[in-house]
Amino acid sequence: MKQPHLTIVKHPLVQHKLTLMRMEQTPSSEFRRLLRELSMLLAYEVTRDLPLTQIEIQTPVTKTTAPVAEAKKLTLVSILRAGNGILDGMLELIPSARVGHIGIYRDPQTLTPVEYYFKMPPDMGQRDVIIVDPMLATGNSAAAAIARIKDLKPLSIKFVCLIASPEGVDLLRDEHPDVPVFTASVDEKLNEHGYIVPGLGDAGDRIYGTK
C-alpha cells in the first residue's frame, strides 16, 4: 500500500551500499565509509525541495545569474550516538548546515525512550530540520525526538534513516503524519528484542566497534 509520508530511496548505488553494510563480516572502518557515502546519497533525495536563490556571478566568459541553495537555514539533528554516522556524510555535502544533537537511548526493558542530552542552534523557528538516525526500529525514540523538536516550532521537519521497520513507519505515521520519512529500506519486522529483521545489527556498535 502506498504511503505518502514515506519515501524509499531505491537508487542502485543506495541499495548496493546498504547490502554491503548488512554483511556481518564488514569491518567497522568499511562500515563507516559506506555509511558516509550512503548518507550523501540520501541527502540528495531529502534536499530535493531545498529553495534556490538567483545570484549574479562572473564566469571566465561573462557575467550571469545562477542558482545557489539556501542551506544556511537548514539544521541537521543527530539522534546520538549512531546518528552521527549519517550526520558526517550529510555535512560533507551540506557544510553550511547548522547542527543539533539529541541524546535518547532506548530502555532495554521497556523499549521506551529516555532523553539525556539536547542542544540545538538558535532561531529554530526559522529553520528547516532534518533528523537523522540509522535505524527506525520501534519508532519510539524517533517519535520522542520529533516531538521535542516540534516544541521549538521549526519551519519543517523530515526524518532520514537507513533502515526502517514496518512498526516504526506506522508509529511515525500515526504520531507525526506531517513528518515525511526517507529511508533506503523497510525491512520485514521487529524481533522480540526490538531489533529490525533482517536489519544490520546495532548501528552504533558497528560504527564504533563496540559491543
Image (cartoon, helix red, strand yellow):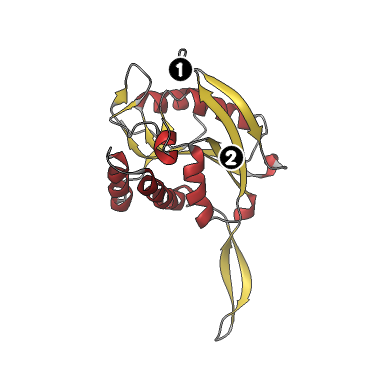
- Identify residue for label 2: 156
Q: In this view, does 175 lie to the left or right of 207?
A: right
Q: In terms of depth relative to the viewer, which is nearer, 43 or 56?
A: 43
Q: Is residue 147 left or right of residue 13?
A: right
Q: In this view, does 173 lie to the left or right of 74?
A: left
Q: Which residue lies furthest to the front in this view?
A: 210
**Cα distance between the residues tagged 1 and 2:** 31 Å
Q: Which residue lies furthest to the right in this view?
A: 122
Q: Nearer the viewer, mark 1 or mark 2?
A: 1
Q: Residue furthest top?
A: 109
Residue 154 percent across, percent down from the top left: 64, 38
Residue 48: image tag = none
Specify whether residue 5 is in view: no
Q: Disc 1 residue type? A: Pro
Identify the residue at horizontal 52%, vertical 25% (top origin): 105
**Vertical relation: 54 (above or below) 116:** below
Q: State the SS at label 1.
A: loop
Residue 175 percent across, percent down from the top left: 50, 23
Q: Disc 2 residue type? A: Ser
Q: In which quarter of the image is the N terminus?
A: top left
